[in-house]
Amino acid sequence: MLTPQGVGKVSMQLSNGTLTYPMVPGVEIGDIVIPPQIEAVFPGTDGHPTLKVVIEVMDGIPECTELHLISADSTRGLNGMDLRSLKLEELVDQVVAAASMTITSRDGGVRASVFKAGGAGELGIETLKKARQSQRTNMTRDRLRKVADVYNSKSQAGISAVAAAFQKSDRTAARYIRQAREAGLIP
């Protein structure tokens, strides 16, 4: 159920938690529209911690930007099992699919979208997977500029600087540098 939540926010109750997002134009990704930011809270049960997560659209892809695990009670703290049981990409997909709308038509630059209980469901999840895959193979010009800036920086330069700046492996950083070089941004 969707309910107003303060000025310009909507709250959606799920079977296992609550989603809250701003009432602003959504971001179009393939055949779905998603809020630019989604806050999700999943209360802990049976001794499991409460999970709070913030998802934001970055470079056209929904990404987890905040993650909070809160101990279920005062009898124990968080442990490695709490982290290992968290499947972050699946969580992001499920939250975004629940909050998304399906685009029903595009006519003369006007988009019509429909929200159904549960969001875009499997269509939403498949659309997100395709978007992530295209992001992995096609970096935006803006992101390539950022790679070049880090790579060419006087204080820290090279593959390790790019890997640290983008929180990627050296191998991925080398691929980013190659793509920036192919785009003419690195000599």
Image (tube, rainbow, N blue to C red):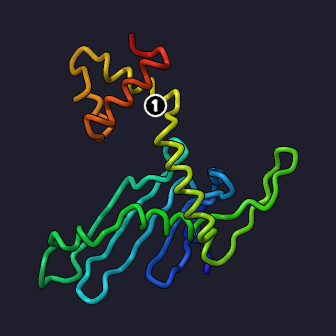
Question: Residue shown at 36%/68% (left/top)?
Answer: 52
Residue type pointed to by label 1: Arg
**24 to 59, vertically: above or below:** below
Question: Residue shown at 31%/16% (left/top)?
Answer: 152
**169 to 47, vertically: above or below:** above
In the rendering, at what x and y percent does residue 118 appear? 60, 76
Q: Secondary structure at mark 1?
A: helix
Q: What residue is pinned by disc 1?
A: 143
Q: Is residue 132 left or right of residue 104?
A: left
Question: Residue shown at 36%/63% (left/top)?
Answer: 88
Asked if residue 7 can be seen in this view, the reply is no
In the rendering, at what x and y percent does residue 183 appear? 49, 19
Q: Residue furthest top?
A: 187
**34 to 6, vertically: above or below:** above
Q: Residue furthest right?
A: 108
Q: Is residue 97 left or right of residue 184?
A: right
Which quadrant is home to the N terminus?
A: bottom right
In the rendering, at what x and y percent does residue 12 appear? 56, 75
Q: Which is more toward the observer, 182 or 44? A: 182
Which quadrant is home to the C terminus?
A: top left
In the rendering, at what x and y percent does residue 19 appear? 50, 70
